[in-house]
Image (cartoon, helix red, strand yellow):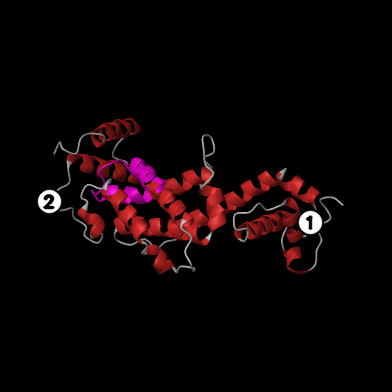
Amino acid sequence: MGVADDAQGGDSAKSSPRERLIAAATELLARSDGKPVSTRQITDLAGVTAPTLYHHFGDKDGLMEAVVARGFEEFVQREGMIERSASPIRDVQRLWDIHVHFGLTHVQLYTLMFGNTGPGRRPVLVEEAEHLLEQELGRVAAAGQLAVPPAQAARAVIAANIGVTLMLLADEPDQPLSADDIASLPLSVQTRDAVLRSVVSDASVVDDPDRGVPAGGQPSYVAAAIALNATLESSHPEQLSGTEMRLFLEWLHRLSKGSNGGD
């Protein structure tokens, strides 16, 4: 039997062989408790034969890459669906909590997604998740509350987010945790707020995210340059030509890399 052997009764016939293979691999991975999942297990659950898997994915590794890609899609979709508030700092905190929640409720998938990275193995969807966080930090910058460029802040935050989640996965809880429990885990909260304090212009805003004006009056010229840079990049004002805009953004970029002590 070949790739056309997949006509099955019941629910499995409602989706394509490719989708059934991804669903089967995802389900088996979730309940594998870290043990290897065989090609035979996957094809049996999907109701197909091995040649069908090879036709769609090349081999089991190719299928697992598709499972990871699907997991990233769900991850990015969850982060992108949060309802934004008036406080960008609070929204960044919520994105962090959603990340941890996803990891602790998709243990094997998260480990496959984030625990096996290395040189040359940075999936495009990881970059998309980082870009999503960078956009949110752009709102923090536009509010004059960021002390470093959004891209630099995003890398610091997501690196800490992944590290905390993997550490929490290593300390498997005795019983399932609710979303509220996960959002209040001390290690997660302490690390989240510590890394945010390291990238904002006024550390106290992390403890009081709804306060819009940084303590001590106007932000430093560095924070101001970062704020204006973020605003211009998102708004593209027509008053400046393309050449003028690029030059102005270059000046702001240079200022944003200056010392915070140069108020």
> Residue at the location (56% across, 55% down)?
108
Which residue range is magenta in the image? Answer: 135-159
Q: Is residue 155 magenta?
A: yes
Q: Which x, y percent locates residue 252?
A: 26, 35
> Residue at the location (33% across, 47% down)?
138
Any mark on residue 48, and which?
1
Q: Is residue 88 magenta?
A: no
Q: Residues within 10 Å of mark 1 (few under 14, many from 20)?
A: many
Any mark on residue 216, and which?
2
Can I make out residue 237 in this image?
no
Q: Which three-letter amino acid code belongs to the residue tagged 2? A: Gly
Can I make out residue 240 in this image?
yes
Nearest the camera: 33 or 206? 33
Q: Which x, y percent locates residue 119?
A: 51, 34
| Magenta stretch: dominant secondary structure | helix
Of helix, strand and loop, which one carries label 1? loop
